[in-house]
Image (tube, rainbow, N blue to C red):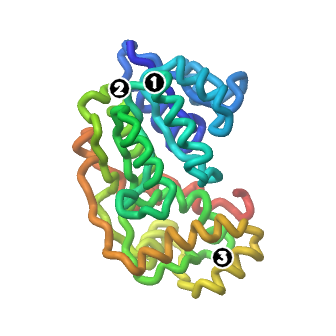
Amino acid sequence: MNTILITGATGNVGIEIIKNISQLNKGDVRVIAGVRDSNSENKILDENGIEKISFDFEDPLIIARAFEACNILFLLRPPHISNVKKFFQPIIEIAIEKKIDHIVFLSVQGAETSSFIPHYKIEKLIEKSGINYTFLRPAYFMQNFTTTLRQDLLKNQRIYLPAGKSKFTLIDVEDVGKVAAVILLDPTKHQNKAYELTNKEQMSFGEMAAVLTEVLDKKITFVNPDLISFYINKRKEEVPSMFILVMIMLHYLPRFKATPKTANWVETISGKSPVSFRGFVVKNQHLLTAKYPTI
């Protein structure tokens, strides 16, 4: 029997994987959630009868114990960990030692050509390890609008990003969960492959603002600040400097690249059509219209 360990199991992606695996699993696969505190309660995990095991990306002993319990690993990079050599090289070395059969790694779209980002370096570590792998490279998460961008939407009715007229490909985290669940339950069909996960749209933030305006029935404006104004504004909001730099890299650098292409892997692998941006906004109206500052 295969045993799957899902790291980041209580995060947005992890929860969606858990939901979908629970629906698809016929009982012939064991699923374990890697969590910081294995005694803590989580409604989704508990309702689906998912086992919990302690997992800490910064503790090799805890990692080793967790890897002893599984042979298939869903791996992601926590946002606060960027030092690949310090943290992820030991993780991959432990995976080799514990004879992990397959790693499904949550990367990002374009990682294979972006050698300056951590995901590129992690992909290379996994490739060199000799462990079978699948790389999931999702596009821009729509859930950014219900998390990091939500406060500006609620308080100022705007999208405030230095993205210019750049067009982005998009993906709903729910669709990532659907794809990951299928692959984790039968990884042999996806050995040493990489999949870009997008929906069927290429949209600028101006176009996204227009959809938000129409669906939410209130004017949402896209504001394109220069980098200095963006940095100063975010510091006033007490956003950490490193996170501001990440936001700049994510939204400003695409202005100097070709528009990323859409891909059909969500539908091909999951059998379901990916969520459109309009569909996402309709589904999440309750989060996008709540009174500020209920974040």
Amino acid identity at mark 2: Leu
Dot 2 and dot 3 residues touching (CB under 8 Å): no
Q: Check disc 1 and report the residue beneath it.
A: 4
Mark 3 nearby-residue class (10 Å; few <14, some 14–19, many ≥20): few
Cα gap from disc 1 to disc 2, whole angstroms: 8 Å
Q: Nearer the viewer, residue 212 or 35?
A: 35
| Residue occupying the point 45% across, 24% down | 4
Where 264 falls versus 58 (above or below)?
below
Tally of marks: 3
Cα gap from disc 3 to disc 1, whole angstroms: 43 Å
Q: Check disc 3 and report the residue beneath it.
A: 156
Dot 3 and dot 1 residues touching (CB under 8 Å): no
**Image quarter for residue 133?**
top left
> Which callout, 2 or 3, points to the residue nearer the camera?
2
| Residue occupying the point 29% across, 39% down | 192
Cα gap from disc 2 to disc 3, whole angstroms: 44 Å
Amino acid identity at mark 1: Ile
Q: Nearer the viewer, residue 281 or 218?
A: 281
Name the disc covering residue 218, or none. Answer: none
Dot 1 and dot 2 residues touching (CB under 8 Å): yes
**Image quarter for residue 248?**
bottom right
Say which label, 2 or 3, has the lower sequence index: 3
Judge from the rendering whether residue 245 lies leftward or rightward of residue 166; answer left or right: right
Amino acid identity at mark 3: Asn
Q: Position of residue 140 (x, y in %)?
A: 44, 61
Q: Is residue 39 visible?
A: yes
Say which label, 3 or 1, has the lower sequence index: 1
Q: Check disc 2 and report the residue beneath it.
A: 185
